[in-house]
Image: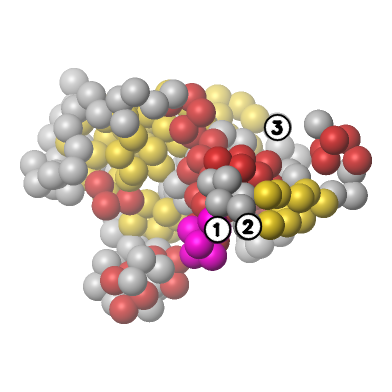
Amino acid sequence: MLKSGAPIPARGYATESSKWHFSPFRFTRHALGERDILIEILYAGICHSDLHAASGDHHAPTFPIVPGHEIAGRVIAVGAKVRKFKVGDFAGIGCMVNSCGECEACKRSEEQFCQNAKTVFTYNSKDVFHGDINTYGGYSNNYVLSEDFALKVPKNADIAKVALLLCAGITTYSPIMYSKVKRGQKVAVAGVGGLGHMALKYMVALGAEVTCFDIVDKKVLC
């Protein structure tokens, strides 16, 4: 049973170094706030940026790291002032879990550029709203976050496939929508990897005529 105001026990798999040797890891999530939801994680995708994070390619990693930012699961608890979710709903989590919500960048849905430097990423990030505790990702059994940073997933969706959309899917969907790709347009996809194959599927579904380029022949011919 969830104790009011108490940290939430969690377990997952963590790596202690850039060698990427995973082992079981127990830790705690912050307590459920009034606008927070607690998600039981059912599926988590594997993104190449997880490898970059643990290897220190972007910035110095803080070990141990529990990776994973393509997360899909079921809501199992909600805060007193949550309005968008109820217990039993399916939900998804991407690469961010909180921000100030008040600056101009946050107001235009560009929380990654929070002008008050309060962006909280899903893992390997300091949670400025909860005493600078380190965040741990989706290779775990649960996650607690602001309802504003969770995506509601329809009950009839294939929840296992939804997880993969929370990074690669969103990354390609946004520019396609911004570019207003239409039926019959000729569009090129450079690189048919994790993101490229998502872009290909989206644009075929939109009715575009798609040509793919890649340096690996079997990717283009498959």
Q: Which residues are magenta?
A: 177-182
Residue 112 at x, y = what percent? Answer: 45, 66
In the depicted view, which residue is nearer to us: 125 or 46?
46
Q: Earlier in the sequence, mark 3 or mark 1?
A: 3
Between the residue at mark 3 and the residue at mark 2, the CA separation in whole angstroms equals 46 Å
Tag 1 residue: 181
Residue 206 belongs to the span the image colors magenta: no
Q: Which residue is found at the position 91% from the left and 40% from the top? A: 217
How crowded pointer 1 is (Cα within 10 Å; few <14, some 14-19, many 20+) is rated as some
Q: Which residue is found at the position 19% from the left and 27% from the top? A: 87
Q: Secondary structure at mark 1?
A: loop
Label 1 vs label 2, nearer the camera: 2
In which quarter of the view is residue 104 placed?
bottom left
Q: Residue furthest front?
A: 184
Looking at the image, is 9 positioned above or below residue 170? Answer: above
Number of the label disc, if any, that sits on residue 185: 2
In the depicted view, which residue is nearer to us: 135 or 40?
40
Tag 3 residue: 21
Q: Are marks 1 and 2 in contact (CB under 8 Å)?
A: yes
Between the residue at mark 3 and the residue at mark 1, the CA separation in whole angstroms equals 42 Å
Number of the label disc, if any, that sits on residue 120: none
